[in-house]
Amino acid sequence: MTIRPILRYPHPGLKTVCAPVTDFDDDLKTLAGDLLETMRAAPGVGITAAHIGVFSRVFVLELSKADGVRNYVNPEIISSSATLVRQTEGSVSMPGATEEVERPASITLRYQTLSGEMKEEDANGFLAICIQHEIDQLDGIFWLLRLSKLKRDRLIRKWEKAGR
């Protein structure tokens, strides 16, 4: 497993819509391992292949050591709650920058495992927020776009002023 360079905001790759994975092979398992190591080094709790310049629909989450590592391939949200929650979010591509984002409190997700097995999962709370955040990135939607223009502009100015 290798720690890979992370694309930094405002890299144009962070706007790229990722392609579906079709090969469930050793290269995919290596990519997932590299994502995990890169995310831990960042540090973060989630990372997509797009964050390292690989534009495939793969992401890894590790919310805590106790919860373990979760790998998602070709994920799609098939339903979400009408109830919304606010959660502070950030990105490994914009370290140190955070802001509250509003998202559905619970979702149902369909995805594949690293071996290609199709799964369906219900998620709520912080897990649901993280999954939605990473799927947005796979769709080329950087988390800042979920903020009001005022909050987004303020955060970008602060980020640029810090020289990041």
Image (cartoon, rainbow, N blue to C red):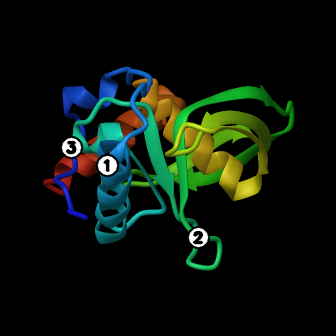
Ranked by sequence position, the earlier of labels 2 and 3 is 3
Ranked by sequence position, the earlier of labels 3 and 1 is 3
Left or right: residue 7 versus residue 143 is left
In three-dimensional space, the C-alpha distance between marks 3 and 1, rounded to whole angstroms, equals: 16 Å
Residue 68 is tagged as 2
Residue 66 placed where, x, y %?
63, 79
- Front residue of 154/22: it is 22
Please tell me which residue is depicted at 67% across the width and 54% down the height of the picture: 127
Q: Residue furthest right?
A: 82
Q: Amino acid at mark 3?
A: Leu
Mark 3, residue position:
7
Q: Residues within 10 Å of mark 3 (few under 14, many from 20)?
A: some
Mark 1, residue position:
31
- Front residue of 43/103: it is 43
Q: Secondary structure at mark 2?
A: loop
Q: Secondary structure at mark 3?
A: loop
Q: Residues within 10 Å of mark 1 (few under 14, many from 20)?
A: some
